[in-house]
């Protein structure tokens, strides 16, 4: 699980709820706005203060650039040739 933004309207003590073991699941370069509420720490999930705005119905984006943490370029992300979000935005589903 890498390069994700997690936004909570209300802060929670557990931003990830594991119903089973997290063995074999790697977390890299994830950011959460947990509204200032401290949470159970998970490696590579960093707290940050950011806001989001609705780009289109049910499509939300951060309101400002987020420079931290640095994007993780593993899990064969370098093999992705198309950005599906922007293809969707251009009407090329």
Image (tube, grey):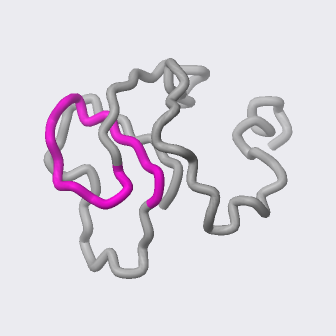
- Does residue 24 lie above or below 90 as drawn? below
Q: Main secondary structure of the magenta part?
A: loop
Looking at the picture, how far across and down is residue 69, in whole percent? 47, 43
- Is 65 placed left or right of 11 in the picture? right
Residue lying at 54% horizontally and 24% vertically, measured from the top left: 65
Residue 7, by quadrant, is top left
Tell me the magenta residue range: 28-45
- Does residue 17 lie above or below 20 as drawn? above
- Is 59 placed left or right of 14 in the picture? right
- Does residue 37 lie above or below 56 as drawn? below
Looking at the picture, how far across and down is residue 2, in whole percent? 51, 56
Residue lying at 49% horizontally and 47% vertically, measured from the top left: 4
Q: How many numbered discs sit on the rendered protein?
A: 0
Q: Is residue 39 magenta?
A: yes
Looking at the picture, how far across and down is residue 10, in whole percent? 21, 31
Residue 59, by quadrant, is top right
Residue lying at 17% horizontally and 47% vertically, measured from the top left: 39
Q: Is residue 29 magenta?
A: yes
In front: 75, or 69?
Answer: 69
């Amino acid at each position: 699980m890498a390069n994700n933004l997690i936004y909570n309207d209300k802060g929670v003590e557990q931003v990830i709820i594991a119903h089973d073991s997290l063995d074999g699941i790697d977390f890299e370069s994830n950011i959460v706005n947990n509204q200032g509420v401290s949470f159970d720490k998970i490696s590579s999930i960093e707290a940050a203060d950011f806001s989001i705005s609705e780009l289109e119905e049910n499509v939300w984006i951060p309101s400002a650039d987020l420079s931290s943490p640095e994007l993780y370029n593993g899990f064969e992300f370098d093999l992705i040739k198309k950005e599906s979000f922007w293809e969707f935005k251009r009407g090329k589903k």
